[in-house]
Image: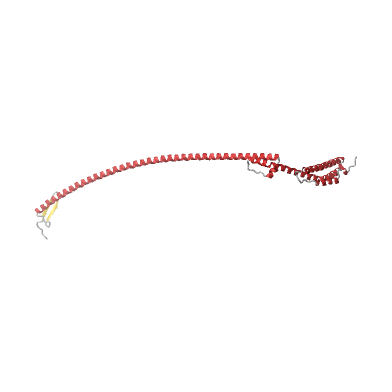
Amino acid sequence: MEILDIQKFDPTVEELNKLVTKSKAVVVTDIDDKGQLEEVKKTRIELKTTRVAITKKGKELREEALAFQKAVIAKEKELVAIIEPEEERLQSIEDEVKEKQLKKERELLLPSRKEELAKIGDSVVATDEELLGMDTEQFSAYKNQRVADKNEEDRQALEAEQARIQAEKDAMEREKEAREREVLARKEAEAEAERKLKAERKAHELRIAQEKEEAEKRVIAERERIEREQKEKEERQATETAEAERLAKEEQEKLEKQKKYQAWLKVNNYDEKTDKIINGESEITLYRTVSVFKK
């Protein structure tokens, strides 16, 4: 079995340090300078090739003996650690340059992208920085999403407009129904007022008729009362006249009798001091005192 030797790694640490030192001198000062970019790429590939060779050599040594494995891995890591940061630095340079190139290309597309988005007509406004950060697929997905959002916005707006129109129709319908109810209520009120007026007119006419009938009855009663009172007055006057005539007649008769009586008294030389008169039912008797003897 061949004796393992960690020094079998090729290249050496010194050679790798030299390679890294050389690589660190590689920079990009102009992203449009293809020579600088080619130098970055060439140096990175050289580093990568060296790293791959080291890894490959490490793998070969690990396979020779498991006991030697840890030392090999440690050496491998040591050697890789020397060049990997520089490789990553160069990779980041390449990535940064590539990103800047993509951004520069996107800057040329920016007006057309903004125009495409403007045609959508939605209210969302993307910044230039956001648009420059999108590749073709990302921009396409973003634009499609904007279109979908605008369609949804339009759909909602259409639904809202339809709802508004329907609400206006419903309001108009309700207003129409309210007016119809108002007209119907007014007609019913007018009909009720007409019925009430007719009833009041009929009641008034009936009351007038009753009052007229009662007035006629009062007139008849008053006429009958007047006629009755007139008749009673005439009868009373007739009675009074008859009574007056009777009294006058009696008085006349009484006077005549009184005259005859006075004539009778005179003829008989009536002396009230000495004579006495007895008034009977059918005759008057005159007594005369001839003489009076005092005891």
Residue 248, can we see it? yes
Q: Is residue 219 left or right of residue 246?
A: right
Q: How many marks?
A: 0
Q: Name which quarter of the figure residue 132 lies in.
A: top right
Q: Name which quarter of the figure residue 196 lies in.
A: top left
Q: Is residue 73 left or right of residue 199?
A: right
Residue 92, can we see it? no
Residue nearer the viewer, 57 or 253: 57
Q: Is residue 176 left or right of residue 17?
A: left
Residue at horizontal 43%, vertical 40%?
190
Check the image and report above or below for 289 versus 155. Answer: below
Q: Name which quarter of the figure residue 292 lies in.
A: bottom left
Give the farthest residue toward the bottom.
295
The C terminus sits in image quarter: bottom left
Picture coordinates of residue 250, whole percent (x, y): 16, 48
Picture coordinates of residue 118, whole percent (x, y): 64, 41
Residue nearer the viewer, 245 or 130: 130
Picture coordinates of residue 263, whole percent (x, y): 10, 52
The N terminus sits in image quarter: top right
Picture coordinates of residue 225, whole percent (x, y): 27, 44
Residue nearer the viewer, 220 or 153: 153
Report the coloring of the rendering: secondary structure
Residue nearer the viewer, 141 or 68: 141
